[in-house]
Image: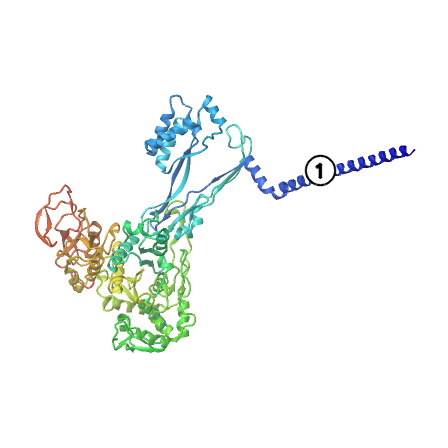
Amino acid sequence: MKSQHADRSTYSQNVKTSRRTLSVKVLAVILVFVVLAGILVFHFFDLQINQHEVLAAKAASQQYMTEKESSKRGMILDRNGYPLVLSSYVYRIGMTPQDVKSRKSGVTDVDIVNQIASQLELDDEKRDTILEQIRSDRVTGWMGLRKRLIDEKTLSYVQIASEVSETKAMALKDWLTANSVGGVRFDAEERRVYNNEMLASPVLGMTRVIDGKLVGVSGLEATYNALLSGEDGYLYARRNNYSNKGVTPFTTPISYPVESSLNLVSTLDMEVQTILQEELLSIATAAGLKSGVHGLVMEVDTGDLLAMAQVGGYDASDPTAMPIGFTDEEWNALSAEEKTQYLSTNLWNNINITDVYEPGSTFKAVTLAVALEENVAYEGTVFSDNPITVQGKTLSCYSGHGHGNVTLRQSFALSCNPVYVQLGQRIGRSTYYDWIRKFGFYDKSGIDLPAEASGVLHRKPSALDFANLTFGESSSVTAIQMARFYAMIGNGGYLVTPRVGCASTSEGLDVMRPFPVQEGKKLLSKRTCERVRSMMTDVMAEGTAAGTFGAIGLEIGGKTGTSRDSTDDDRRTFSFIALNPIDDPQYVVLVTIRKPETPINASVVSARAASRVAARIQNSREKGQRYNSHDLNVLSRQIEIPETEGMKIRDLAMRLVTINLAPIVPTDEYLLDRPCGAILPAPGTMVGTGSTVWLYPAGDYEVEWVTVPDFRGLNYHECIWLASEHGVVIAPDGIPAGVAISQDIPASALTDQVLTHDDSGAPTESAELDSPNDGKVRKGQVIQVSFGSQSRHSSPDNTGDDGTE
C-alpha cells in the first residue's frame, strides 16, 4: 500500500512539475510574442508616425517627378539702353560611358570621341581616356561576365569638360543629335557677363550661385534681385519608370509656369561713367594711390546717379583677380586671407556709400546755408579770421595766420575756419543740430544700394564738438550724403533721395515701366540756395579752387575741403564738390582723395578733376565754353613737358598736375613707385594747357601708332578731349578763339615728318618716317591746331567776332 501510495505521489508530483514546466514555456512563448509584437508595434509606429514624411517623400520621388524651370536672369541697362550686365550660359558636359553610341551605322566610337575632342579642344591624352572609358564600360562576353563577377562597377557619369561656351556646346550637341548619339549630357550653368570690366563694378555688384541659381549679393544685383531673377516654374507629374521614362501616359501633370525676369534700367550713363573713371585714375596717379579715390555725378533735381566710381576698381567678371598697383610677385606673396581683406576693404565695397570721412570745408556750405536761412548774417557781415579758442583749444584758419577782418562772402572763398565757428555761435547749438538732422546727416540717404552707412555725429555734442563741425571736422559723413546736400542747394531747397534704378522693362526702353520718384522735402528757401551758389562761384574765380583748367569758359561753382585724421599720422582727406552750371544747376560732381602718398595740395587737385569732369560732360552734351579775353590768354600759353630726372611715376604725375596737365598710367602698368621709363610727349615738348601726358614705368616700351582725329569745328576744350581719346596732344597756334579751322597733320593721314629726340629726350630736327602704319602717327604726337572765328555751339560771352572782349 505504501508503495502504491508512493507511486501515486510521484506521479502527481511529475504531473505538477510537467504542468509547471508547460506553464513556464507557455509564458515564455507569450512573452516572446509580446516582445516581438512590441517591437513590431514600435517599428510600425516609427515608420507610420516618425518617418512618415521622409518615407512619403521617398515614395513620391519614385512615383512622381518634379521639373524646375528657371528664368534667365535679366539685364542691367544704362539710361540709354546699353547693356551693362547680361547673362549667358556655359555648359558642363559629361557622359554615361556605356550609353555613348550611335544608332546610325557607320558612326564608330572613334568618330564620336574625335568629334567631342575637336569641338571641346581636348588634348590627345584626354581623348584616349574618354575612348577607353566608353569601351571598358561596354564590354560583353567572358570579359563582361568577369567584370560582373568581381563586382567592378560601371561609371554612371564622367565629366568631360566644364565652362564650355554656348557656341561650342551647341555645335557639339547638334552633331550628336544629327548622328543619333546618346549618353552625353549637357548641363547649362548661367553666368553673368559684365561688358565694361572695371566700370561701375561696385555699383552693379556681384552674384553667386546658391542652390543652382544666380543670386545677387552686392550692388544693384542684390537690391533688385527679385526683379532680375523672376520666379521659377515647376512641373509635377506621375513618373513613368518604364519604357522611355518621363511622364506616365494619360496622366495630367500640374504645372506652375515660370515668371519671366525683367531687365533693370539704371540711371547710369556709361559716357559720364567713363569720364569720371578716367579723371579719378589720373588724380590717383598724382596722389600716389591705388585705392581711396572716389567720386560721383548726380542730377540735382531727381537724385539720379549718372556715375559713381572709385580707384581701385575690380573686374566684376573676375572679382578676385589681382588689382591694379600690384606686381605678380607682390600679390602672390599675400595669403588668401590678406588678399580677401584687401579686396573687401578697398575694392568690393562701394566707398561712396559705405565709408565715412570728415568732409572738411565742404561742410561750410551747410553752416552757411543755415546761417542765411536763420538770418543771423548776410554776405557783407564782417568777421575776424583771427584764431578763436573753444574749451581751451585754439581753432585757426587753414592758412595758419588768418586773413584779418573779412566779409562772410570772402570767408567762404578763402575757407576761413574761425568765421564759421562764430557763425555757429550765432545760430546756436540746438538750432544748428536740428538742421543737421533735417538734412539727413544722422541717417542714411535712402539710396537703392545695400550696405549704406549713416553719418557719425555726436549725440550730445560739447562746445568744441559743435565748433569743429561748423567747418567739417570731428564728425564723419558719406560722400552720397554730401552730394545730396549740394543737390538741394542746386535745385532750390528740396532734399532728394538718390537712386540708381529707375525703371524695369521686358524689352527695350520704349516699353519700360518707370519706378515712382520720391518727392523731395522742401527744407531751404530758393533765395538761400541762390545766395550759397553765388558764393560758390567765388571759390572757382578767386578762392581755393581758382585756375582749374576744366572751369575755364564755364560757370561752375564749388567748394574745396580738407580734413586731418589725427588717428593716422595726421594724413589728410581732400575733397571738392561742384555744381554745374551754377546759374541753372543740372549736376553735382563730387571728388574725394583719401590720404595721398605725395605732398600735393590735393583739395586743388580734386577741384581740377571735378572741373574736368564737369567740362567733359558739358561738351558731351554739345554745350561749348564761353571764353573771355583772360581765358583765351591762359589757353594760348603752351606748357613744356618737364624732364623726368629719374623721378618716380607718382612724383612726376604730381608735378604734371600742378602745371595743369593730366597724367595717365596704363592700368596694367600702374606701378607708381617705379621710376618713369617713358613719357609721351617727350621732355622738352611744348603742348597745350590741359593736355594728357602718358607715363610708363621703367622697362621695355613698345611704340604705339594711333590715328589722327579731325579737330575742325571744335573749340579748345573739345580738341583737348578728342586728342586724349586718340592718343595725341595739341598745341594751339596763336589765340584759340572760336573753333579749330586747320591742323598741321591731316586727320588719319601719314605725316612725312616725325619728331626725333636726342639722348635727353628733347626734340631735335625732323626725320623721315619709315613705317608701314599709313595714316597713323606715334602716340604722343603733337599736332598744331589753328583756331578761327567760326563758332559751332555758341558765341563767346561779350566778345567780338574774334572771341575776345
Q: Position of residue 721 (x, y in %)?
A: 22, 54
Q: Left or right of 452: which side holds 8?
A: right
* Residue 757 horizontal side relative to residue 663, left or right: left
> Colour scheme in the image?
rainbow
Question: In which quadrant of the rendered image does the N terminus lie?
Answer: top right
Residue 314 at x, y percent in the picture: 33, 51
Between 70 and 517, the one lying in front of the other is 70
Name the residue: 20% across, 52% down.
696
Residue lying furthest right: 1
* Residue to which mark 1 is pinned: 33
Q: Is residue 210 left or right of residue 631?
A: right
Residue 45, above or below 661 = above
Query: For the C terminus, which image quadrant?
Result: bottom left
Q: Nearer the viewer, residue 528 or 233?
A: 233
Residue 553 image offset from top left, x and y in percent:
22, 61
Closer to the camera, 607 or 80?
A: 607
Amino acid type, mark 1: Phe
Q: Residue furthest left?
A: 765
Residue 802 seen from this side: no
- State whether residue 721 appears in this view: yes
SS state under label 1? helix
Q: How crowded is the residue under tag 1: few (<14 C-alpha within 10 Å), some, or many (20+)? A: few
**Towards the viewer: 309 or 32:** 32
